Amino acid sequence: MKRLAVCGGRVIDPATATDHITDLFIHGDKIVALGEKPSGFEIDETIDARNTVVCPGLVDISARLGEPGTEQKGTIASEARAAALGGITTLCCLPDTDPVIDEPATVEFIKRRSRDANQARVLPLGALTRGLQGEQLSEMSALYQEGCPAMAQANGVIRDTRVLLRAMQYAASLDIPIILRPQDPWLAGKGCMHEGAIATQLGLPGVPAIAETVAIGQIMALARQARVRVHFSKISSRFSLPLIEQAKSEGLRVTADVSINQLYLTEDDVLGFNSQCHVVPPLRSRHDREALRQALASGLLDIICSDHWPHETDAKLAPFPSTEPGISSFDTYFSLLYGLIEQGIIGWTQLIRLASARPADILSIEAGSLAIGQPADISIFDPTVEWQVSPETMFSSGVNTPFSGRRLLGRVRCTLINGQVQEAT
């Protein structure tokens, strides 16, 4: 097995309270030492990490890859490579694939494709209900045993609250976390952007913030009854934050994430019918964005996710309401994360906790740490590199991004997954 040394980088690991310039030593797929080289350790390869940040590989709790079902948008191989080159070593794909991830065979297919790609590790999220139809419970136990770390409903609606309660009770009996994107389907209606003055100006149907808060209130009441682990996915409204704070203060087993895109973009970016900013949930006001940033800084929100959703070019060319929602986020993810540090919103240790250690903890997976004996999943990030976002500088098959043309600071130099170096060639 190869013996690898990562030398001279600023090693930051919240899990071990590490933040200083030092060396890291890897034997095969495991971390074996931090600081001094082990006695008798013969180095086969050295990575010069001077002027970089060396941290645990990022863990992304919410992404879509295209495969299976919409391979024209991306494949597991293409998107896992883009994730790895963006510093992500483990990612969760949502269950709204085709077929839906509600059978162990589909889980095994995705895991096999991930192994064959030999890039970022892909963990399928199991469907909470069969076919995501919201009517019958999925075989959560079988999906969990096959390798799904959590169950999710993606954008599928569960109209019958009795079904949702039973799903929570079933998940609680197995101690499986469930991931829900809170949105009341009747209040949201056919909305395609935030309900407000700009939606009125553009003549577009809006999604009110109350669609999110009403759903959170309902989920909280059911979770209180079921005693289940609930993770709220992609919070977008400032009015949701006091509800999450209340749930946590009550001792409910509640966590929440926010998309990196919600921390930068707002409804203003939709002006001109910019379909690259058509996302679910919609981009909201500047006040919402600032409140979400403050909630990260205070520790109320637990995770930042990429919400990666690649599309082919044609998917964004129709009139705004008819375009497919989503942003290709893997390529810009780490640079935008670093931007939060540059703007003084959070520090390095908190950032890595939000994007690596905490999601690993919530999913109960072995990741997010540089402790001795842990998998050698490592991101090496160069904060001095300035680059311009364009189709030519992106690795994802989907180049649908509103950040195209922007110059961003900081980029991943290379990523190690199970001790194997992944870098652009």
Image (cartoon, helix red, strand yellow):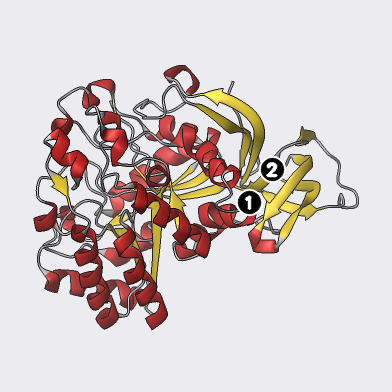
Q: Nearer the viewer, residue 92 or 49?
A: 49
Q: Quadrant of residue 167?
A: bottom left
Residue shown at 39% from the left, 53% from the top: 258
Q: Tag on residue 53?
A: 2
User: In this view of the protein, which residue sits in the foreground, 158 or 220?
Assistant: 220
Q: Quadrant of the C terminus?
A: top right
User: Gap between marks 2 and 1, in whole Å?
Assistant: 9 Å
Answer whether labels 2 and 1 touch (C-beta < 8 Å).
yes
Between disc 2 and disc 1, whose residue precedes?
A: 2
Q: Amino acid at mark 2?
A: Val
Question: Is residue 304 shown above or below 164?
Answer: above
Q: Quadrant of residue 142?
A: bottom left
Q: Residues within 10 Å of mark 2 (few under 14, many from 20)?
A: many
* Residue beneath disc 1: 348
Badge 2 element:
strand
- What secondary structure is marked by label 1? helix
Q: Amino acid at mark 1?
A: Trp
Q: Residues within 10 Å of mark 1 (few under 14, many from 20)?
A: some
Residue 253 visible here: no
